[in-house]
Image (cartoon, rainbow, N blue to C red):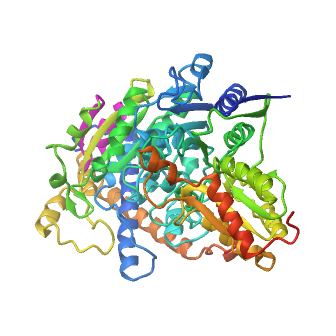
Amino acid sequence: MTRIITYAAAVNEALSIELERDPSVFLLGEDIGVQGGMFTVTTGLYQKFGAERVMDTPIAEAGFVGLAIGAAVAGMRPVVEVMFVDFMLVAADQVLNQATKLRFMSGGQLTVPLTIRTHQGIAAGGSGPQHSQSMESIFATIPGLAIAMPFTPADAKGLLATAIRSDEPTLVMEHKGLYFSKGEVPEGEYLVPFGKAAVLRAGTDITLIGFSRSLEWCLAAAEELDQEHQISAEVIDVRMIVPLDVQTLAESVSRTGRAMVVQEASKTASMCGDIASTLTEQCWSDLKAPIRRLAGLNMPVPYARTLEDQWRPSVADIVSLTLETLEQSPAAGRR
Amino acid sequence: MQTTTADPQAENKLLDSLYTMWLIRASQERCEQLFRDAKVRGAMHLYSGQEAVAVGTCNALNESDRLLFTYRGHGWALARGMPPEAMFGELFGRESGCSHGRGGSKHMSDWSRGIFPSNAIVAANLPIANGIALAAVRKKESRVVVTAFGEGATNQGVMHEALAQAVIWNLPVIFACENNLYAEVTPAHEMRPTAEVVDLASGAGIETAVCDGMDVAAVEATVGPLVDRARRGEGPAFVELKTYRFRGHMTGDFKTYRSEDEIAEWKKRDPLIVLSDRLRESGVTEERIVATQRRAEFAVKDAEEAAWNSPEPAPESMYEYTSSWAEPKR
């Protein structure tokens, strides 16, 4: 049975179910207890499971992420919330130097069944340069973390539940602009396997590849391309950037011969380039045009509306870059 | 006629400590030589001079307790019972090493003895120790967690976060600060806003203690009650152990930052001399003291040989112990 609920409620449901089924699971983070979290994600969990299972922490990210790592090593399954991705950098040593290396450094003696939840991106707008960033590439470049970037409410639930049951450290990067989006979500226990991309819309002329909120723009662009320009765009949700489902992406790109990777984060040294070059290597003989990258600007996210609106890629950007790509290599079967 | 009434049990315990301290000293001096002869890879951070700290602290622990320490960790590993061949194996990059040759000198681990992989980031273990302690409390296990670190680590913000959280959640953690006077090669007091190291901790409202880290009995006598207190659920403690590093920050450092006179002065209080004198005073014969030293030296020699004779990791084991998401190809 599914029903339509918000992304925030889907995350809440996964947390509640995992807390219920496994006594070693506990949550910790800033304002997640009585308050229920900045975006209502943990609403009611403190009241249901108590202060030992849903722990409020001091504003000391390195301290409480480190504590979660220690608890994970010692047999618990902590789910730590880092309130904004920007604060992840305060805990970067613990995440990147510690959690990612303990199993290896100990020659396999330790495991780190740790889940870190954070959210990123521009939401309603106006959060300014230090509360609007997207940082997945920073955490992907150091080996050792699985990184989930759910777009749909169902994935927000299912990928998180899989992360909590994983014996390895996982970073779940939610998007604060998606928390109140709605979608069909299965009731009860629901797991989404790691490393499987999902085709959100089938198409034949170009593959639009996105993750997290960029799919909202990709889907809108695909609709516009179909309605206004008779172009058939396939839209694929990467879902996880580590491990990356190259097979599903390559199969689609080989078929359409064209691709664009769309992300909210700034372009330099980021996932869009990594995905584009991987697909270029895999699909070279089938490509009809260069794989395009569409990303946030290489500058801080501004506050003012007139400026912030220009910062991230828009539906119009996806449409016009698609048209440009199609002009370079006209589609044979274009309607 | 013998003037002291010796307690044979206490005497044997002190001889055991002497043995372990010699095991550490002999292994560390051998490491210095191996580095000079270019027989080991990378630099090493030696423990000579600080033996009483690790041995005295470990004497105060139960088997179920957990221990975290840093890259200056060979002494801690041996004090906690790691076989010396597992330590040498790691230094030589052998599959038989305590971390299967994946970590090296800075990363000694043996979780079966409660030894968390030693950390090359000076204060990073402190919050992790809190988490290990929290898990023990939640699972109702009787475990105390000791995290040892140098005085240089007290300058990192995360130490202060960890002390505060240990107090807030009343965790059974002993923060053992080994003050060897130098943060790498900078005199620590020049980089400290307070007169004493322990003053940095007291603001967190944590129980504190200071002790002579050159005297193994004094270390155990100070740390022991703090461990017992933590085990009873009465909270964490911060203990400063005043000691001295006889070798450099790492093998090959230039040693221009401290005088030969200073080193000579501290060597008069060599923890091995302090303990041997104590044993003599309590009537232990010179013969037994010397035999203990020789036994440790032979154990080091045998361990080194065993480690050299064990195989290096097979090239095809490259991806062992990596993340499931690591791609086993270039």
Side (left or right) of A156 relative to A193: left
Residue A276, quarter of picture: bottom right
Image coordinates for residue A161, horizontal then vertical, percent: 71, 38
Q: Is residue A94 above or below residue A4?
A: below
Q: Residue at x 13, y 68 (%)?
A: B259
Residue B116 visible somewhere in the drawing = no
Q: Is residue A256 above or below residue A193?
A: below
Residue A330, quarter of picture: bottom right
Question: Which residue is situated farthest in the top direction here?
Answer: A47
Image coordinates for residue A215, horizontal then vertical, percent: 69, 50
Image coordinates for residue B291, horizontal then vertical, percent: 38, 61
Q: How many marks?
A: 0
Image coordinates for residue A277, horizontal then vertical, percent: 66, 72
Question: Which residue is situated farthest in the front direction here?
Answer: A228
Question: Which residue is situated farthest in the left direction here?
Answer: B261
Q: Residue at x 87, y 63 (%)?
A: A335
Q: Residue at x 46, y 55 (%)?
A: B118
Quadrant of the frame with the C terminus of chain B: bottom right
Side (left or right) of A114 relative to B232: right
Q: Residue B42 in magenta?
A: no
Quadrant of the frame with the N terminus of chain B: top left
Q: Residue at x 39, y 23 (%)?
A: B234
Residue B91 visible somewhere in the drawing = yes
Q: Nearer the viewer, residue B72 or A5?
A: A5
Side (left or right) of B73 relative to B269: right
What residue span does the magenta drawing correspond to?
A: B205-226
Side (left or right) of A248 relative to A19: right
Q: Nearer the viewer, residue B140 or A12?
A: A12
